[in-house]
Image (tube, coloured by chain):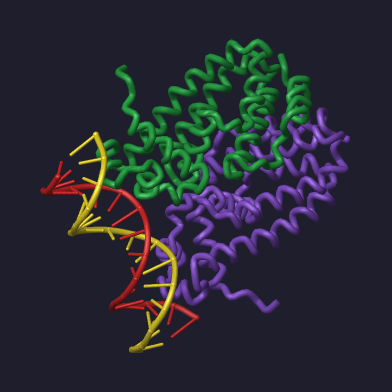
Chain colours: A green, B purple, C yellow, D red
Amino acid sequence: MSRPPLARDKVLDAFEAILIEEGERAATMEATARAAGVSKGGLLYHFGSKDALESALLERLHALVEDDVAAMAASPDGPIAYFLRTSVMENDRIDRAILATSRLAQGGSARARVALRGIRDQWADVLRTHTRDATALDLVMLVSDGLYFNNALEGGSIPGPVPRGAAMDALIAMVERAAKA
Amino acid sequence: MSRPPLARDKVLDAFEAILIEEGERAATMEATARAAGVSKGGLLYHFGSKDALESALLERLHALVEDDVAAMAASPDGPIAYFLRTSVMENDRIDRAILATSRLAQGGSARARVALRGIRDQWADVLRTHTRDATALDLVMLVSDGLYFNNALEGGSIPGPVPRGAAMDALIAMVERAAKA
DNA sequence: GTCTATACTAAGATAGAC
DNA sequence: GTCTATCTTAGTATAGAC
């Protein structure tokens, strides 16, 4: 792996940002190029098609998830707490990648949908041994999905009805009481 | 209220179906007209703009939600069980309307986003007196959001990782144990 | 490696025939 | 009330200059 070309990443960041803040419809090649400060032609040098742009976003997501799954498995306060706590959008890199991908999925991209499903399965695999039974695993996964869903509805940084701070701590405690192995 | 014009409803059903099955991107005026068996011009007689089409969908949703909220409040096995059970997509009219609206929301429609947020608030208002505390209400709402999120990721009828049948009964029991007032 | 210019396609919308 | 024809705008993509 050589050091990554900067312009490429800048374009990818811009694409991600537009997906998150303005939706899939607005994330056109032209808008992405403008936001990244390059021309349409310049963008197309780095990514030969819109499909290639999406593929690059998914690749970046997979790399981030790999790290996250490892961190979750090694978390000191347990995978359930780690998992739920990181399910509220903190606007860090993995959250943004997931949010952007779910915009693509909702926009109709089958590949994005499959990617999200696969990531969910990876998380579930880690949590399985830490939850009481299949029902408890369902509970934890669905609460996490719910947190992501609410984040996805909001623009990305607008505060929604998602519990934060002490409310989030209380929720985690309630879920752990019900689900922990 | 006079009897509803049939062609109008047929167009609205087609729009909804395309949103659900193919995503927001695919739900164009032309595709909607084709699916409804009318011409582009014919569609535009009923709905003067794409905006008008979306408005009609939201209006229909609001009417369906009004009925649903009443049914939830009057449900014999309690609002929590009713709420969670009806959060799994059964492909009935309200589920389809919500799913289509969430496609629009993810596509960038601020109006659709506000509508979904408002509906969520209506449900929460009914559930508030039936849940132990604010944390318990969060739990119930998030599990429901999670169920909808999974339904939204799938095409609408493709079975996802959402619990069904006995697994769903077990989940409802677990949530009620943790959250019921 | 990045830009301009442009071709091609499809979208939303209007006008007016039937 | 529904259709055909057409205008305008915007999206993806190509060719080729710099």
Residue name at image x 39 percent, y 45 percent: A32
Q: Is residue A131 left or right of residue B123?
A: left
Measured as percent of width and height from the top left, residue C8 is found at 21, 58
Give the camera-side residue of B97 and B136. B136
Q: Quadrant of the N terminus of chain A?
A: top left
Give the camera-side residue of A128 and A158. A158
Measured as percent of width and height from the top left, residue B169 is found at 73, 33
Give the camera-side residue of B105 and A42. A42
Residue name at image x 61 percent, y 18 percent: A127
Residue B77, quarter of the rendered image: top right
Residue B144, quarter of the rendered image: top right
Instruction: Give the vertical position of C16 relative to D2 (above or below).
Output: below
Instruction: Give the vertical position of A84 relative to D6 (above or below).
Output: above
Residue name at image x 54 percent, y 27 percent: A120
Residue name at image x 82 percent, y 48 percent: B126
Measured as percent of width and height from the top left, residue D2 is found at 44, 78
Q: Is residue B116 left or right of residue B178?
A: left
Measured as percent of width and height from the top left, residue A155 is found at 58, 44
Instruction: Give the vertical position of B23 relative to A96 (above or below).
Output: below
Instruction: Give the vertical position of B150 relative to B38 (above or below).
Output: above
Q: Quadrant of the C terminus of chain A?
A: top right
Q: Is residue A88 left or right of residue A25?
A: right
